[in-house]
Amino acid sequence: MIKNILSFFKGFSYAFKGIIYCIKTQRNMRFHICAMGAVIFLSGFYELSRGECALLALVFASVISSEAVNTAVECAVDLTSKGERSFLAEKAKDCAAGAVLISAVFAAAAGIFLFWDMDVFRSIYLFFAEKPVYILAVIIYIALSIFFIFGINNNERKE
């Protein structure tokens, strides 16, 4: 029984390794994480219901999960194709990337439905107009995000 429990928890370590691998090697995963951070910050200007917060969590999970599955498909295809570009390998990668795109487009649509409110846009504008130091914080966040997304170049795959 103890062995089964330890094996169960060891599965979590594999999952965390996979998440870290995706973050280290996938620029789009890092982009999605930065976009998620921005949405979480901006959602503070809204009075979201529990259901709307749950929707946001599901949307975040959908995009991040589909990006992780895309990475897994790419790794598996690259492992089995050994540098050869077969038609089916290319289609598998294209379909996995398409799944990420579908998830991201519908996440953006959900964001528009949830957040499109001119009154809140005005309050966001006034917030930053009254506290210009926060504009500096946004600029720093954008700069750090750009560095996080594009500055990490760890695409090496161990064979």
Image: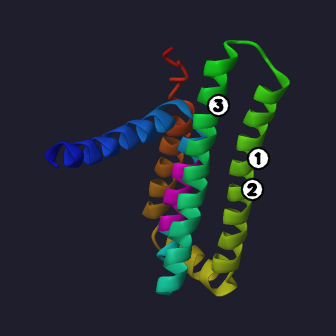
Q: Secondary structure at mark 1?
A: helix
The type of residue carrying mark 1 is Gly
Q: Residue at x 68, y 57 (%)?
A: 103
- Residue 94, position as x, y percentages in the image: 78, 37
- Residue 71, position as x, y percentages in the image: 59, 36
How many numbered marks appear? 3
Q: Residues within 10 Å of mark 2 (few under 14, many from 20)?
A: some
User: For the stretch drawn in magenta, what is the main secondary structure?
Assistant: helix
Residue highlighted by disc 3: 74
Q: Secondary structure at mark 2?
A: helix
Q: Residue at x 50, y 76 (%)?
A: 54
Residue furthest out toward the left: 2
State the CA–CA distance, disc 2 to disc 3: 17 Å
Marks 2 & 1, CB-CB < 8 Å contact: yes
Mark found first going from the N terminus, 3 or 1: 3
Q: Residues within 10 Å of mark 1 (few under 14, many from 20)?
A: some
State the CA–CA distance, disc 3 to disc 1: 12 Å
Residue highlighted by disc 1: 98
Quick check: 98 above or below 83?
Answer: below
Q: Is residue 20 left or right of residue 25?
A: left
Q: Is residue 57 left or right of residue 99?
A: left
- Residue 148, position as x, y percentages in the image: 49, 38
The type of residue carrying mark 2 is Ile
The type of residue carrying mark 3 is Glu
Q: Nearer the viewer, mark 2 or mark 3?
A: 3
Choose between 17 and 132: the one closer to the eye: 17
Residue highlighted by disc 2: 102
Marks 3 & 1, CB-CB < 8 Å contact: no
Mark found first going from the N terminus, 2 or 3: 3
Residue furthest out toward the right: 87
